[in-house]
Image: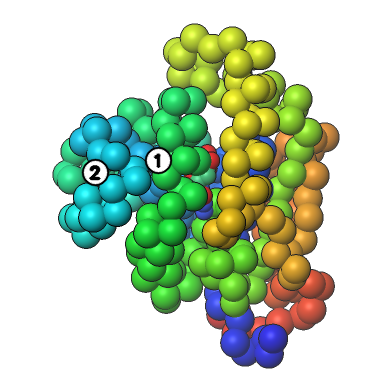
Amino acid sequence: MNYQERQKVVTIDGPSGVGKSTVSRKVATGLGWTYLDTGAMYRAVGLQCKQTGIDLKNAAALAELLDKLDIHLLPPLQEDSDVRVLLAGKEVSEAIRTPEMGMIASRVSAIPAVRAKLTALQQAMGKNGKIVAEGRDTGTVVFPKAAWKFYLDASPKERCRRRVEQLRAKGQQVAPEEILAQIIERDQHDRERSIAPLRMAKDAMLIDSSRLNAGEVTAWMLKQVRGHVDSLGNVLDADNNK
Ligand code: DC
């Protein structure tokens, strides 16, 4: 791809519990760019489906729900907290971030109509660049022309340890063995679905964060972006990166 065609976008994809949110938020803060948490959008759709009790196989009902979908992402209140989410004007930031909603989100995210709707919304949010997008398909499908694509990975055991810590810090009682089972099931589901499966983009840079902390991963990513080096190691035209 011609470097001029590259979009001023950072994408950070990877499996659940790998630390994408923390790192994405930090990279966005470091660059002064907008943080786009695409997983929060799938979680919000999952919550809407749960609240309305809709049958996911009923295409007409799902189309109507997606047509009326009203999701707003607001910046985190603090640097280390999650993006806030409004669903039909009501704050659902806490309600969407439970292990149960993670599983429901993974299920609804395999439905083509849901992906088409959210992908279009995400592309509209990122059309002017200066965005750090996090998810499963942001480098492969949503922003294929992003200049900086990263794929974060870590062992399931380490991801489980981090997730348990994170949920306990929020006051949620969780059993580690259940979280590990959910991580493995969700990974398999996200990787094996036929549409926009979780995979590393060909032009992404792989980082195994098992032995790196969030600060170290962030610093390395910021170095690539600020050094005008794209994820294949090509030096970008500085004009393209103003
Ligand atoms: O990142 P997360 O755990 O909040 O994402 C919840 C689910 O949403 C995840 O299991 C799969 C789905 N998802 C997706 O399919 N594509 C994305 N870009 C982001 C999330």
The spot of residue 199 in percent (x, y) is 69, 56
Q: In the rendered view, does 184 fall on the left or right side of 87?
A: right
User: Is any part of residue 110 visible from this angle?
Assistant: yes
Residue nearer the viewer, 3 or 198: 198
Q: Is residue 199 above or below residue 94?
A: below
Q: In the rendered view, does 233 fall on the left or right side of 79?
A: right
Residue nearer the viewer, 79 or 118: 118
Type of the residue with mark 2:
Leu
**Residue 188 location, quadrant:** top right
Name the residue that disc number 2 marks. Answer: 87
Q: Is mark 1 within 8 Å of ligand 1?
A: yes
Measuring 29% from the left and 33% from the top, which residue is drawn there?
A: 50
Q: In the rendered view, does 234 fall on the left or right side of 150?
A: right
Q: Is residue 171 above or below residue 67?
A: above
Measuring 80% from the left and 44% from the top, which residue is drawn there?
A: 208
Q: For the C terminus, give its image quadrant.
A: bottom right
Name the residue that disc number 1 marks. Answer: 43
Q: For the N terminus, give its image quadrant.
A: bottom right
The spot of residue 144 in percent (x, y) is 59, 73
Measuring 36% from the left and 39% from the top, which residue is drawn there?
A: 46
> Label 1: few (<14), some or many (≥20) within 10 Å?
many
User: Is any part of residue 74 visible from this angle?
Assistant: no
Type of the residue with mark 1:
Arg
**Residue 54 location, quadrant:** top left
Q: Is residue 162 above or below residue 200?
A: above
